Amino acid sequence: MQLQQTTQLYWKNLPELLHPEGERTQTLRGFDKEFIDIVDYIIRITHRIWEQKNVGLCIDYYAEYCPVHTLGGYSDNVETVIKNTLKTVGAFPDRSLIGENVIWRDLGENAGYYSSHRITSIMTNKGPSEFGDATGKTGRVTTIADCVCYQNKIVYEWLMRDNSFLVKQLGIELLDAAHHFASLPANQTFEKWRAEEITRIKANEPSKHQWPTDIDIDRKFEQLGSDWVNTFFNQKAFSDVSRFYHVNAKAQWPGGVEAIGIPGIRGAIIQWLAQCPDAKATCDHIAVVPFENEGTDIAIRWSLVGTFASGKQGLKQYSGQDFFILAATHLRITDGKISEEWTVFDEVAAYANLIRDFNVQQKCIEVKEPDHVE
């Protein structure tokens, strides 16, 4: 079975994707017979759950125990997946999900497949959400969902969404959204995971979830993805932007930041890193697939920790704390260099975590201070 035979999303209309023709191009051991490859599986189950609002289908397509990591929380059972999905649909009942790409990796018949699904959503805020009260405004947001899929079920997931761009479009100030998010109850399992991740990244240790299987394409692209993380976030070698990117490359970063060309992309990365200049990052997973007949797509899941050091009004007081990011990047490689980039992480949750940590520290200080005696 050739890698090139799998479903390509580029320029495909929805009816064509929902009714694929032809035989299976992958083994898909344990998956329903209707699915022809892992891309088809991801696109159709997403459509059924979100577009058709069949939220109960999560029971069919998520394992009973399924850890889901986000930068703002954690869950590990299908009931919570259903509850969170209903909350999101309640806040954004007209939410649509446009599948832009699925970059995947075959993990072997005893482990299934790894998929990195990039989605554009259009949605109107009709109900209260994790960001605050309903605004009635419509926004567009990019999401990347990395999933391990085994025998017709999603068994592990990392979910990254550009919420800072979304709240801007909804008319909510970023810090207001972060403060509201920080006021919600914290999940202790999440806090434990976050602390462990911060320690791991500082020690430059690999993720426990590498799934080190062979990539069925030239390994130079896998190396390029790893080098991309190391060069810019660890070495801070920004002169190498021209070595990685085409002169007219386009990049999309959180907050709706769009950069074009070498100076623009270099500036976007430097400007963001300036708020945690000692940041270190780990490359936690890479998948590589061909893009049509024109190039190669790379999906990178990465994590970053730095000492927060922002000079912005409203953020200064949180300086000195650990700033943790769970992120995903899709790179399109043409003629050996990056022509397009999509980087996604949740800045609202990242700032909310700073606010929570700060509030906990302040409470500890208040407890330790002795009562004032006249």
Image (cartoon, rainbow, N blue to C red):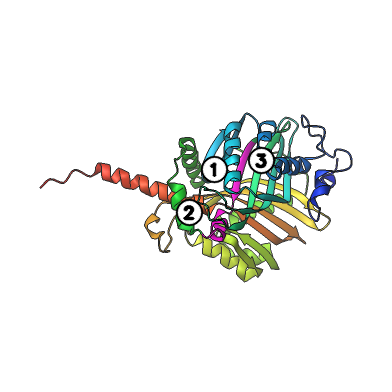
Residue 107: x and y, percent? 72, 37
> CA separation, marks 2 and 1?
32 Å
Residue 297: x and y, percent? 74, 53
Circle 3 Cα neighbour tier, 10 Å, few/some/many (<14 / 14–19 / ≥20): many
Residue range of the region highlighted in magenta in the rendering? 156-171
Mark nearer the N terminus (1 vs 3): 3
Res. 57 visible in picture: yes
Residue 205's label in the rendered image is 1
Residue farthest to the left, as pictured: 374
Q: Which residue is mark 2?
A: 177
Q: Of the residues shown, which amino acid type is indicated by label 1?
A: Glu
Q: Secondary structure at mark 3?
A: strand
Q: Is residue 252 left or right of residue 234?
A: right
Residue at 27%, 45% (x, y): give it. 366
> CA separation, marks 2 and 3?
27 Å
Q: Which residue is mark 3?
A: 147
Please identify, in this view, whether the residue under mark 2 or under mark 1 is nearer the observer: 2
